Structures are given as C-alpha cells and as structure tokens.
Amino acid sequence: MPRVTDEYRAARREEIADAALRVFLRKGFQAASMADIIAESGLSAGAIYGYYASKTEIVHRTATRIVGARVLDVERLAEQDPLPVPAEVVRVLMDGVQRELQDPKILVQLWGEAMTDPALLELARGVVVRIRGTFEAYLTAWHRRENGLSEDDAAALAAEQAPVFVGACQGCIVQTGLFEDFDREAYLDALVRHLPR
Amino acid sequence: MPRVTDEYRAARREEIADAALRVFLRKGFQAASMADIIAESGLSAGAIYGYYASKTEIVHRTATRIVGARVLDVERLAEQDPLPVPAEVVRVLMDGVQRELQDPKILVQLWGEAMTDPALLELARGVVVRIRGTFEAYLTAWHRRENGLSEDDAAALAAEQAPVFVGACQGCIVQTGLFEDFDREAYLDALVRHLPR
DNA sequence: GTCTATAGTAGGATAGAC
DNA sequence: GTCTATCCTACTATAGAC
C-alpha cells in the first residue's frame, strides 16, 4: 500500500470534515443532513461513505477537531516563560475560538448535543478536564510567583479557582453565541479585575 | 363558549407540556419523537395534535416554561429587604434550576438549539437580558449599601459585573451538565470569595 | 474512486371511526 | 374529544454502473 494513497485518503477525510464543519456552523449538528454535507463538499454520497461510515462518525470527527485545537491553545500558553497574566490566558483561549470557529456557536451546540450523546459527552468532558488542569497548573505557578504563596497554598487556591475560570470562559462563549454584539473585551476586563487575587 | 372548556383546554395543554418536558429531559429536544411524547402523556397522536399544531410548538412552549420560571426566581430575590449577599443570588438561581429541572442539562440543550433556531434564540436572549438586568439592579443596590458607592459609581460597577455573574451561572450550569459530580457549592464559594468587591 | 439511483426506515402529521 | 390506522416526507445508507 503506497504512501500516496494514505495521504490522499487523509487529505480527503479532512476536506470532508472541513465541509461538514461549515454546514454544522450554519445548521447545527442534528439539523444538518448528509445531503447538505454532500453538497458542501462537492462530492457524492457514494464518495463520502467511502471515507466515513456514518454521519455520526463525521460529527464525532468534526467535534474532536473543534475541541482538540482549544486544548492546544491553552497548553501552549501555560508553558511560556514570562508567565502571562490570567487575563491573557482566558483571552487567548477565547481568541482561538473566535479565530478558528468564526463564532463560538458551534461549541454551545456541542455542549447541548453532549447532554444526550454519550460519545460527545465523553469528548467534551475530556477537553474540559484537560483545560481545567492546565488552568490549575498555570494558576499554581502564578500564585507562587506573583503572590509568594507556598506550593501547597498556591495549589489549593488554584484548585478552587480553576473551575471558576473554566465557567467564566463557558459563560463568555454562551453569551457570545447568544448576542451578536456581546462585548467580549469588557467581559474579560471585568473578569480579570475581580477574579485573580 | 363556557369557561370550563377553556380551563380544561389549558389544563390539558399544561399536562402535555409536562409530559414533553420529562421526555426532553431524558432524550433532548430533537431526539425526542412525537411517539415518545405521546407515550409519556398517555394520550394519542390525534389528541395531542388537538392541543398543539406541531412538535415545534410543544418545544417552544416547554422552553418558555423552563426559562420563565428562572427569571421569576431571581426577580423575587432582588426585591427582598435585607438584600441577600451576591452568593445567595447566584445560589438561589442555581437551586431553582436544580429543583425544578432535576438537572440543568435541559438548559444547555436549549442554548445549543438556540444557536440554530431563531425562535429559541429570541427566547433565550430575552431571558438572559432580564436576568442580567435583575443582577445589575441588585448589584447597584448592593454596592451603594455595602460599599458606600455613589449612585453612578455603583451603577457603573454593577453594569460591568452583571455579565460576569451571568457568565458564571452559565458556566456552572454547563459544568453541572457535563459532570455528574460537579461540586456546585465549592464553585459558588470560590466565585463569591473572589468576585464581589 | 466516484457517480447516480434507489432501497429502507423513521417520524411528523392527518383522516375518519367512535 | 379521543383513538387507530395510515399517509407521506425526508433522510441515511447502499448497490451497481462507469
């Protein structure tokens, strides 16, 4: 089996996933039909099913891409040497969402679907756990360095604050999805002015 | 047209909406079929369609009931005389969600659906606007009384903080939906310890 | 590998008896 | 007013030609 074939296959799969993402952004995961994805991809039904066994598989693949990239955003940031201020961490996460997904509606849809789809729930949980963990590690380092707390005190404070950071990001995402003109900057400013201490 | 008939009709409508809510809680809005709602209500297809023109109408009616009750929770609280501490306001909102909806999964589903359904979007927006407004009025009063701020300063601070409160609630709801064992008390404690000031 | 045409099915909504 | 039986649309997935 020559390498070209595998690469071709992989590229095609991504191409289909890209088209599916665009459709899901417009219509939502469930309301989007295979006909929509087929039209958007420019391929045919037969071709699509050569690369994915089912619509469910396309949904899960697309969802994995969406959330996987968010995790990387945050993990990369927490490793920077002059540790960014908490504002920056939240902002980068939100900017990544905005940049790559145009608007974060799709994430809200994903959480909604996860409430009744075990596989998506597992996926969403995993991502939130990883992001929360990254926030926690980051906050521990931050409180030690900036506030001179002991390892234990810093870790305890971080463990307490991390879920609130996660929740604040989720709240920002939900509100951005609900209101076209939601003022993300004002929200992040207010968040950072009152949260970290 | 005798009064009894209208009351009977209204009662039946609520009965059907109750059954639909139970089904939506289990399966989600889209995955729930009319057959599910019919079975849960104990009625028949013909009977249901005598009270609601479509599944969409049932979804919208149910959604309105879900979120309408949340608004009342908060508005009632903000009118109490010894003004409750900010913790309490958030807690009551979350407790109302927990009590009446068993778990807040359905709200996350609702937000997800709203991302692609204009009517639900309008509904969700209206509710968030009202709750945000209530938070704002409450926070203005709070900052005047507790922190001795001027009317203007209190209002400005409240306007800045209200969306963060809303976001924090939404984050709490999303995380409660994602994790069976999410520690709401710890979250609210952390939120309140760091947010209001 | 990709297309067209279609099989198979689920589910929303209705017609007509009682 | 309510039930049963059924219509019909819309969608996922496959079969078979090229």
Image (spheres, coloured by chain):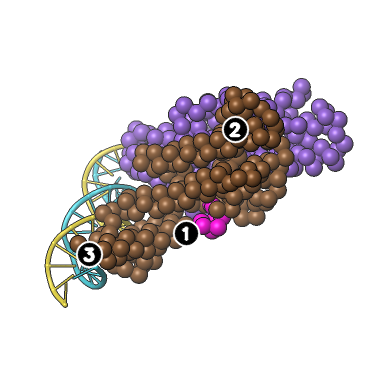
Chain colours: A brown, B purple, C cyan, D yellow
Residue found at the far top of this picture: B82
Q: Are marks 1 and 3 in contact (CB under 8 Å)?
A: no
* Element carrying mark 2: helix
User: What residue is pinned by disc 3?
Assistant: A2
At 28% from the left edge and 53% from the top edge, which residue is drawn?
A54
Q: Do the residues labelled 3 and 2 touch (CB within 8 Å)?
A: no
Q: Where is residue A39 in the image (x, y as percent from the top left)?
A: 36, 67
The residues colored magenta run A97-104
Image check: C10 left or right of B109? Answer: left
Q: What residue type is labelled 1?
A: Arg
Q: Does the magenta stretch include residue A85?
A: no
Q: Do the residues labelled 2 and 1 touch (CB within 8 Å)?
A: no
At 43% from the left edge and 35% from the top edge, which residue is drawn?
B25
| Front in this rendered view, residue A164 or B21 | A164
Same chain check for tags 1 and 3: yes
User: What residue is pinned by disc 2?
Assistant: A140
Q: Where is residue B144 in the image (x, y as percent from the top left)?
A: 83, 32
User: What residue is pinned by disc 1?
Assistant: A26
Q: Assess disc 1: are there few (<14), some (14-19) or many (≥20) residues with their C-alpha within 10 Å of its C-alpha.
A: some
Chain letter behind tag 1 = A
* Element carrying mark 1: helix
Chain letter behind tag 2 = A
Q: Assess disc 3: are there few (<14), some (14-19) or many (≥20) residues with their C-alpha within 10 Å of its C-alpha.
A: few
Chain letter behind tag 3 = A
User: Which sits earlier in the primary sequence, circle 2 or circle 1?
Assistant: 1
| Front in this rendered view, residue C14 or A164 | A164
User: Which sits earlier in the primary sequence, circle 3 or circle 2?
Assistant: 3
Q: Is the magenta stretch mostly helix, strand or loop?
A: helix
